[in-house]
């Protein structure tokens, strides 16, 4: 169990050397107890103390990695109940279900969806993470063959799903080097599955019929030396499943209850048969503490909103999302299309480009890097003034793309128009609307 | 292994506010725990969904959003009846889009006539939403509140810049105000205090934190609402213990992601289902952050959200 600050203090060198960055050993011990610092920050701690402290200093919800290489997925490692308290760390993995009873064509179709359904947004690629291969046949050979096909046909992380350890072992044979998540160790199979996970150094999920049973299972795995553990509380109705997620997170963070200090796996695909409802459940578990969310299938209309929501909720509240500086084309603008400039706060960019699209007037949108600040804040902070905008307009390349010399600036930066006309000789500076909503009307009446 | 179930210590409660009048009035608020944390406390009243009606035919809606209201978008009263009769609306929100000075700029008298007509045609609680242009909203709501005296409308957005005029009109003609602030917990609290100083009684106030949809900053609204609930329920901040109203539909459906066709981008899937899900999933996020009233548009999105609320509160 977790140690208190005083218990930790007793194991430290008590020299108050300050090398760890904290003035006293007692203060360091207190920080360690609350999970704010890592033990490794102290260069003088003894090996013996290290061992004793390793458990106490471990993060309250252990991080777990599934898969290898570029596509390795890290989940868990969360430190707060509410994102405004600090931030949510690791976005939940989104998985597509593939059953070993599906025919080749269907398996291939799902591998294609996994690969093709990805989206560019604010310079990031949003895509799903995992392929959950489930044994429905109960036949180890069949499972092994489908897992082999999935492993070959995709670089995503893999979840092996069966309640039969022999079937799991067969699947593991086909993809052990990919470090799949083995799902699941149950009351009946825990010893066998634990052995398998240990031998292959793969992450493993437990599935219980209650949180008590889950805690017993994770304790067994921990005693067997396993740390990469994922929890399925077994609940398959929305209310109970939500409650379990909250209790698991809270027990780990607020009570430092180690047996529940692991990321979770959630199965909207087993809660409902309706894909729309499934998407809604998934959207709830993105915000409320899901570690992996397994969906029965992928559809663009639900996967896209889900991936965007995930990005939104897991954005660091202290660091606004920014768009890349550059020239953005809306529609297919020609050499006499209007040129507008705005800042690179991602919401500003989305709104402005959205309104331009609504207007159906092909346009050039220049986005200036203002460190993720909106127009008003960037202007007030001196990051969106004439002497900064003008050099960007000159070097960004827009002058080679248009024949006219007119630049539309946001209404909130109107006072920069004089300065800009000085800095950009020959250019006419037009003051656009203050509100994005008025952009369509403005550009519709624009003439070069 | 025995597990000690951790529980939040709550010291406050959300005020219960009655909206509308007579038989079809609804009560919102009353929560003594975080949204849907039913193992810790109570949600005596499920959040409500108000269906949108527009005072003029919408111009830039995608096909999917228009289709359920085909043929009646030029008749707000018929539109309102359809929401109740065909889609089971328990509340309505009349959006006074045509009064926008940057749009049709319809006058106060005409707007008030439309509101009166809709209010007379329905018996469910009616929210009336302006354009957030202070001068115009003051003009419009002066008339609206007067001609609808006794209907207990919910009027919004009531902002710091027009709260005196709108607050006075609400007190005078007995309507509820939706106190609206730009995604900021301190400004929200301050406006509630200002309304209180003006003499608006607590039972006539709900809060609008300003929300946006998935992809357009929903995380800001999400966290501000969570902070409001935290302050209200665990820090006894009684100036934040008001039900929260979220005007979400128009934010969702105006986004280009709700409009683009499957033909133009096959990876985005079916356009109608995508629009419905963007609305329903955005609503779901706001619900678990603390929404008490959601203003929504598409009947299928509404049904999805209502069903989910029922399941999340099922015994």
Image: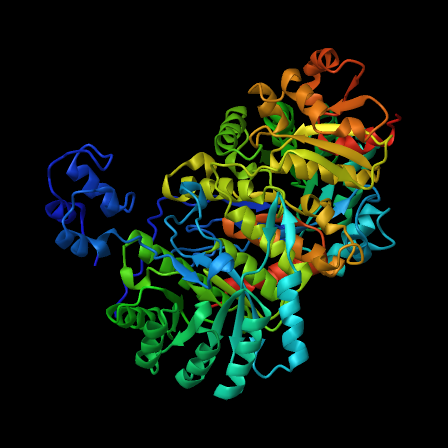
**Quarter residue B57 falls in:** top right
Can you give x and y, in whole percent of width and height, for residue A326 in the image?
68, 34
Residue A136 appearing in the image: no
Residue A186 appearing in the image: yes
Q: Residue at x 71, y 24 (%)?
A: A393
Can you give x and y, in whole percent of width and height, for residue B266 in the image?
75, 59
Can you give x and y, in whole percent of width and height, for residue B258 in the image?
72, 51
Lateral position of residue B174 relative to residue B108, left or right: left
Which colour assignment does the render follow? rainbow
**Quarter residue A193 falls in:** bottom left
Q: Residue at x 44, y 48 (%)?
A: A88
Can you give x and y, in whole percent of width and height, for residue A56 in the image?
22, 53
Q: Quadrant of the N terminus of chain B?
A: bottom left
- The total of numbered circles placed on residues is 0
Lateral position of residue A170 relative to residue A51, left or right: right
> Is residue A234 depicted above or below B168 in this figure?
below
Q: Nearer the viewer, residue A183 or A276?
A: A183
Q: Residue at x 51, y 44 (%)?
A: A315
> Is residue A346 depicted above or below B163 in this figure?
below
> Is residue A278 depicted above or below A343 in this figure?
below
Q: Nearer the viewer, residue A57 or A13?
A: A13
């Amino acid at each position: 169990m977790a140690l208190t600050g005083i218990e930790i203090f007793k194991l430290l060198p008590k020299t108050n050397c300050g090398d760890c960055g904290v003035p006293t050993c007692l203060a360091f011990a207190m920080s360690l107890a609350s999970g704010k610092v890592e033990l490794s920050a102290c260069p003088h701690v003894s090996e013996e103390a290290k061992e004793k402290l390793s458990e106490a200093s471990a993060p309250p919800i252990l991080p777990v990695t599934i898969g290898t290489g570029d596509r390795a997925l890290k989940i868990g490692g969360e430190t707060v109940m509410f994102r405004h308290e600090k931030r949510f760390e690791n976005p939940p993995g989104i998985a597509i279900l593939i059953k070993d009873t599906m025919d080749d064509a269907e398996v291939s179709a799902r591998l294609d969806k996994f690969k093709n359904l990805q989206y560019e947004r604010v310079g990031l690629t949003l895509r799903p993470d995992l392929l959950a291969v489930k044994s429905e046949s109960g036949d180890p050979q069949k499972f092994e063959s489908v897992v082999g096909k999935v492993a070959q046909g995709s670089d995503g992380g893999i979840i092996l799903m069966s309640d039969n350890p022999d079937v799991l072992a067969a699947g593991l044979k086909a993809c052990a080097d990919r470090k799949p998540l083995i799902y699941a160790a149950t009351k009946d199979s825990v010893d066998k599955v634990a052995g398998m996970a240990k031998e292959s150094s793969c992450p493993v999920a437990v599935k219980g019929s209650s949180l008590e049973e889950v805690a017993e299972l994770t304790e067994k795995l921990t005693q067997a030396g396993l740390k990469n553990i994922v929890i399925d509380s077994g609940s398959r109705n929305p209310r109970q499943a939500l409650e379990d997620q909250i209790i698991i997170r809270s027990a780990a963070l607020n009570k430092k209850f180690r047996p529940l200090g692991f990321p979770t796996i959630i199965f909207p695909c087993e809660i409902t048969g309706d894909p729309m409802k499934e998407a809604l459940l998934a959207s709830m578990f993105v915000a409320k503490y899901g570690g992996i969310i397994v969906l029965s299938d992928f559809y663009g209309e639900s996967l896209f909103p889900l991936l965007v929501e995930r990005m939104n909720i897991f954005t660091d509240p202290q660091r606004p999302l920014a768009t890349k500086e550059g020239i953005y084309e809306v529609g297919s603008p020609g050499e006499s299309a209007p040129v507008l400039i705005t800042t690179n706060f991602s919401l500003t960019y989305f709104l402005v480009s959205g309104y331009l699209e609504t207007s159906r007037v092909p346009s050039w949108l220049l986005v200036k890097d203002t460190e993720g600040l909106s127009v008003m804040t960037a202007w007030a902070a001196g990051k969106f003034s004439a002497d900064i905008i003008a050099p960007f307009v000159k070097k960004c390349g827009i002058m080679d793309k248009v024949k006219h010399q007119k630049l539309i600036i946001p209404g909130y930066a109107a006072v920069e128009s004089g300065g800009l006309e000085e800095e950009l000789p020959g250019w006419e500076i037009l003051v656009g609307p203050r509100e994005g909503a008025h952009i369509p009307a403005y550009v519709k009446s624009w003439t070069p | 292994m025995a597990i000690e179930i951790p529980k939040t210590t709550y010291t406050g409660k959300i005020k219960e506010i009655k909206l509308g009048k007579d038989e079809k009035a609804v009560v919102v608020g009353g929560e003594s725990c975080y949204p849907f944390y039913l193992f810790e406390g109570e949600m005596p009243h499920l959040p409500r969904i108000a269906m949108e009606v527009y005072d003029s035919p919408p111009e830039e809606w995608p096909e999917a959003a228009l289709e359920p209201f085909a043929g009646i978008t030029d008749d707000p009263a018929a539109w309102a009846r359809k929401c109740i009769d065909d889609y089971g609306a328990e509340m309505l929100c009349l959006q006074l889009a045509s009064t926008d000075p940057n749009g049709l700029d319809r006058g106060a008298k005409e707007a008030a006539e439309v509101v009166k007509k809709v209010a007379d045609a329905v018996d469910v609680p009616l929210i009336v939403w302006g354009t957030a242009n202070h001068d115009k909203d003051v003009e419009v709501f002066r008339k609206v509140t007067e001609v609808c005296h006794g209907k207990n409308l919910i009027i919004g957005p009531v902002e710091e810049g027009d709260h005196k005029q709108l607050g006075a009109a609400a007190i005078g003609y007995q309507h509820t105000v939706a106190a609206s602030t730009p995604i900021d917990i301190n400004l929200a609290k301050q406006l509630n205090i200002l309304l209180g100083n003006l003499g608006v009684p607590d039972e006539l106030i709900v809060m609008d934190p300003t929300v946006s949809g998935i992809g357009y900053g929903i995380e800001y609204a999400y966290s501000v609402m969570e902070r409001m609930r935290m302050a209200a329920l665990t820090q006894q901040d009684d100036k934040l213990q008001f039900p929260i109203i979220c005007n979400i539909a128009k934010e969702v459906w105006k986004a280009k992601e709700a409009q683009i066709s499957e033909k133009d981008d096959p990876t985005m899937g079916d356009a109608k289902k995508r629009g419905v899900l963007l609305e329903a999933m955005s609503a779901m996020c706001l619900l678990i952050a603390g929404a008490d009233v959601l203003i929504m548009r598409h009947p299928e999105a509404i049904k999805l959200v209502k069903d989910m609320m029922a399941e999340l509160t099922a015994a």
